[in-house]
Amino acid sequence: GTTITAYDTIAAISTPPGEGAISIVRLSGEAALQTAAKVYHGKNLLKVPTNTINYGHIIDPDSGETVDEVMVSVLRGPKTYTREDMVEINCHGGIVSTNRVLQLLLGAGARMAEPGEFTKRAFLNGRIDLTEAESVMDLIRAKTDRAMQVAVDQLDGDLRRLITNLRQEILEVLAQVEVNIDYPEYDTDQMTTKMLQEKAQLVLSRVDELLQTASQGKVLREGLATAIVGRPNVGKSSLLNHMMHEDKAIVTDVPGTTRDVLEEYVNVRGVPLKLVDTAGIRDTDDKVEKIGVERSRQAITKADLIILVLDASQPLTAEDEALIKATAAKKRIVVLNKQDLPAQLDQTQLAALVPAEQLIRTSILKAEGVAALDQQIASLFFGGIENSQTTVMVTNSRQIGLLRQAKASLQSVLAGIEAGMPIDLVQIDMTAAWDKLGEITGDAAPDELITQLFSQFCLGK
Ligand code: GDP
Ligand code: ZN
């Protein structure tokens, strides 16, 4: 196992900034208990049992002034998040006094933690691997329950186990190749080559499966950029309102979440949609929608998914047709709205322009057909895996990039065998695949990568 190192003592406020009844200041490191004890008035923290919560006060050691009334959790390593001794101070007095508590701890010898440094220590001390560390980040940023679940599964080590198994498969065959190279007189060449080929094929197919989850994983993590387009008065704002309000609130009460007010997300059956240019939809009603199609074009370019709204109670206009054509190459859902009114739109004309499977008929006014729209969005993105709860997904571009590199190496293995290349050359590619997979879990990750990765965390995690 990994040896556990207690590093210098770090401190940070680990609750999100802003209002909140309780904020938590976290300490971790070799002198976590001693540092807290210097500013805490109550029981002797050095003597209380581990995993206890202790009532007391934070006192400014210089002035003797009481700064806050607190509950202090004493968590001795190695059974802690970082595996070091940790202290969590629950402050009650609001953000000003929480900051003062932090300042006092810094004065007592702690160092301000860098973003992600607590999690980095958990990694360095072998408690979690890189996929798990990344899932901590994903959890912090998760926008839907589904995204949370994927992150939680990774935190459980599902991806790590899968990758570790694949590496084990490769290692076994590499060992066999070694034997063959060392004892060529056994003349097991053909057998070894066959084994290499089979293993490379097996691992390649698993890597491919993982890569297929990547697009869904990315959507879960980052949200699917979605544009609602259509000419004036077809029902875009009504649709937007429906999406924003009907129990589709985005998960924001995850500890450590910082709300990103600049982006609007809605949760449609687990798919976080990041709405593009909703300002356009909201403003245009007043501004007579002059900018119409031009503005839509920009939104269309930026979006991964287009929801094009048409008015079924009106004949198809040239503007409708222009939008249908402008979105034809995109992932698209065409909403035929206002089904509650007498139909005017020529169905034959429409059928010639829009494939039937892209069409959803709604009356947003009467909330009809909107469930089908939600369903369509979800199945576009989850397809066959929609109902499987245990699918391991790769969710971030670092993991995806490494899987692609592993895939390329495995393909070289297969191509090399096809071409009758010497086995020790094929072995190099197989080893490269093993290395790349190892980087995913951090078993072979370079230092600068680790530093860069953890710096993406929120402060206090
Ligand atoms: P936008 O200009 O595309 O954003 O369209 P709005 O959402 O502002 O809707 C324009 C008008 O159509 C409003 O009066 C809505 O109440 C109405 N509307 C929206 N959806 C429906 C629908 O399904 N049926 C009917 N009858 N009216 C609708
Ligand atoms: Zn509108």
Image: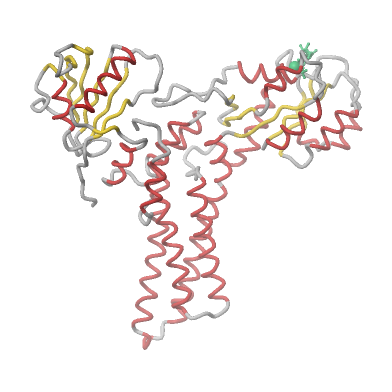
Going by the picture, which residue comes out furthest to the bottom? Answer: 185
Residue placed most toward the observer, 2 or 454: 454
What residue is drawn where x is 35% and y is 46%? Answer: 129
Give the x, y percent position of residue 188: 41, 82
Residue 310 against residue 77 in the figure, above or below: above
Residue 400 against residue 303 in the figure, above or below: below
How many numbered dots are placed on residues in this image? 0
Give the x, y percent position of residue 209: 54, 52
Q: Quadrant of residue 385?
A: top right
What residue is drawn where x is 39% and y is 75%? Answer: 177
What residue is drawn where x is 54% and y is 80%? Answer: 420
- Here the colouring is secondary structure
Give the x, y percent position of residue 403: 50, 54
Give the x, y percent position of residue 93: 29, 11
Residue 350 against residue 392 in the figure, above or below: above
What residue is drawn where x is 22% and y is 26%? Answer: 105
State left or right for residue 412 relative to residue 286: left
Q: Quadrant of residue 318?
A: top right
State left or right for residue 150 relative to residue 156: right
Residue 185 against residue 33 in the figure, above or below: below
Residue placed most toward the observer, 318 or 284: 284
User: Which quadrant of the frame does ligand 1 lie within?
Assistant: top right
Q: Quadrant of residue 11?
A: top left
State left or right for residue 304 relative to residue 318: left
The C terminus - image quarter: top left
